[in-house]
Amino acid sequence: MSATPARRRRAASAAVIQFDRSRISKALQARTRYKYVQPRVEAEGAGWKIVSPNCSRNIDSAGGDINIAWLLPSGDGRWSLHAHDHAQQRWHLKAGGLTLAQALAIVNDDSTRTYWP
């Protein structure tokens, strides 16, 4: 019995989603801040959340994991980039209509310490 067209589309979509996760993880190796920590990429809603140990202890004095950024695909090949407000425990939209490469460049550069506090 062969897969239905809907099942094949779901399987192809899942493969693309996992590919995005790999692209994000690989791109994080080029960041300029906290190169010695190992961030991870986790599913968050329909997008991906970057989580990292808080080595500076600015947010978590115990050095626990903190949310760094949330990348949310818009469905047209573009992405929204969110930063986490640790005081209010919520995400804030920082930019929309970006390619994944543009969003990751912003997170990796982070000259204003918006993402890597």
Image: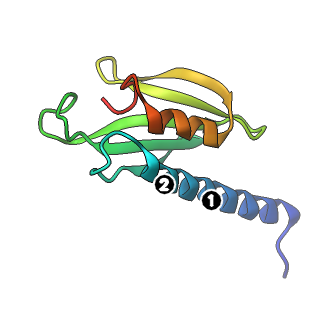
User: Which of the labelled discs sits on residue 25, or is there none?
Assistant: 2
Amino acid type of the residue that numbered disc 2 sits on in the rendered structure: Ser
Residue 47 on image: x %, y %? 57, 42
* Residue drawn at point x = 72 percent, y = 57 percent: 13
94 left or right of 62? right
86 left or right of 13? left
Residue 69 sits above or below residue 87 on the image: below
User: Which of the labelled discs sits on residue 19, or is there none?
Assistant: 1
- Give the quarter of the image for residue 117: top left
- Give the quarter of the image for residue 18: bottom right
Residue 7 sits above or below residue 81 on the image: below
Residue 113 on image: x %, y %? 36, 26
* Residue drawn at point x = 12 percent, y = 38 percent: 62
Q: How crowded is mark 1: few (under 14 residues within 10 Å), some or many (20 or more)?
A: few
In front: 37, or 62?
37
* Residue drawn at point x = 36 percent, y = 36 percent: 67
Question: Of the residues under marks 1 and 2, which one precedes in the sequence?
Answer: 1
Q: Residue furthest left?
A: 62
Amino acid type of the residue that numbered disc 1 sits on in the rendered structure: Phe
